[in-house]
Amino acid sequence: MTILVAGAHGGVGQHIVRQLTEAGHSVRAMIRDADQASAMEALGGEPVVSDLTSDVSDAVSGADAVIFAAGSGGEKLEAVDKNGAIRTIDACVEQGVNRFVMLSSIGADAPDEADQLQDYLRAKHAADEHLKASPLTWTILRPTRLLNGAAKGTAAFATSLNFDEHPKEIDREDVAAALVASLTVSETEGAVIEMTSGDTPIREGLAAL
Ligand SMILES: NC(=O)c1ccc[n+]([C@@H]2O[C@H](COP(=O)([O-])OP(=O)(O)OC[C@H]3O[C@@H](n4cnc5c(N)ncnc54)[C@H](OP(=O)(O)O)[C@@H]3O)[C@@H](O)[C@H]2O)c1
């Protein structure tokens, strides 16, 4: 498959590009800064310079699927986390790119109930709802707090996790593995999935949903 990765130079995005390449996919690595091109090539991706705050049709065109792992980091919640995601979803519809895997966040289902980051979660919620209402084949993954430890290859997945039973953090490399695996695990299609640290092999956990 040819997969466009939005946010390809990010903490999760770089793991995604490398893992997709290792799995034999063609990767279009979307970056907004051309200086990041060589880093994308080193991971096996073809750099595509495009900014989520403007038209992304050319970046999306020709892909079989999109993994959206971009994020504003808090400064441009409306422009990037909400409207940038919506723009990418709409471009997929227009360009006939049917598969869309969204990196969302725990708490994006009910932003008003969150203790913190409500504006960020409202932006993620709006993007997720737009994706769910689209004609695309979608997966929405909602991990807990992201860490930079080495991949464990295991996690906990549920439509609604019980945090009395699970820690509320997960390593970026394992989140990338779940996003990549979602492309080929049909049980993730049309599913909103919460993810945190746990003991279930990632592919097995997704297939059990
Ligand atoms: N941090 C957490 O604990 C947590 C928990 C759950 C979910 N999440 C979600 O996971 C996402 C990815 O996390 P991460 O740690 O990989 O984030 P990250 O390292 O900040 O990566 C985000 C990527 O998005 C890119 N980006 C930002 N604005 C853009 C624009 N206008 N056009 C194109 N690309 C743009 C950034 O590009 P540049 O390299 O040019 O800045 C960066 O490469 C977060 O954004 C968040 O939505 C995070």
Image (cartoon, helix red, strand yellow):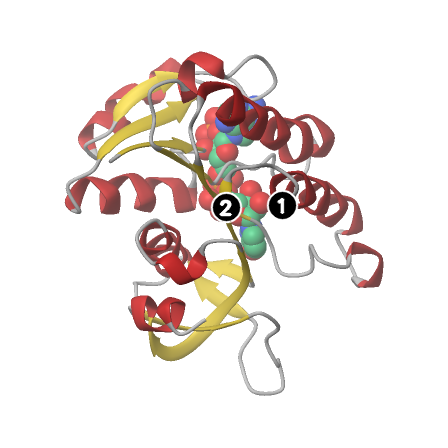
Tell me which amino acid carries mark 1. Answer: Lys
Give the label on residue 7, or none: none
Residue 161 to residue 27: above or below: below
Q: Determine which residue is flagged by label 1.
A: 132
Q: Looking at the image, which residue is at 69% across and 54% down?
A: 108
Residue 109 to residue 207: above or below: above
**Callout 2: helix, strand or loop?**
strand
Pointers 1 and 2 in contact (C-beta within 8 Å): yes
Residue 189 to residue 203: above or below: above
Most foreground residue, 4 or 47: 4
Q: CA distance from mark 1 to mark 2?
A: 7 Å
Q: Looking at the image, which residue is at 62% across and 81% down?
A: 162
Q: Residue furthest front?
A: 135
Q: Determine which residue is flagged by label 2.
A: 138
Determine whether, in the image, residue 201 is placed left or right of residue 117: left
Give the mark nearer the N terminus: 1 vs 2: 1
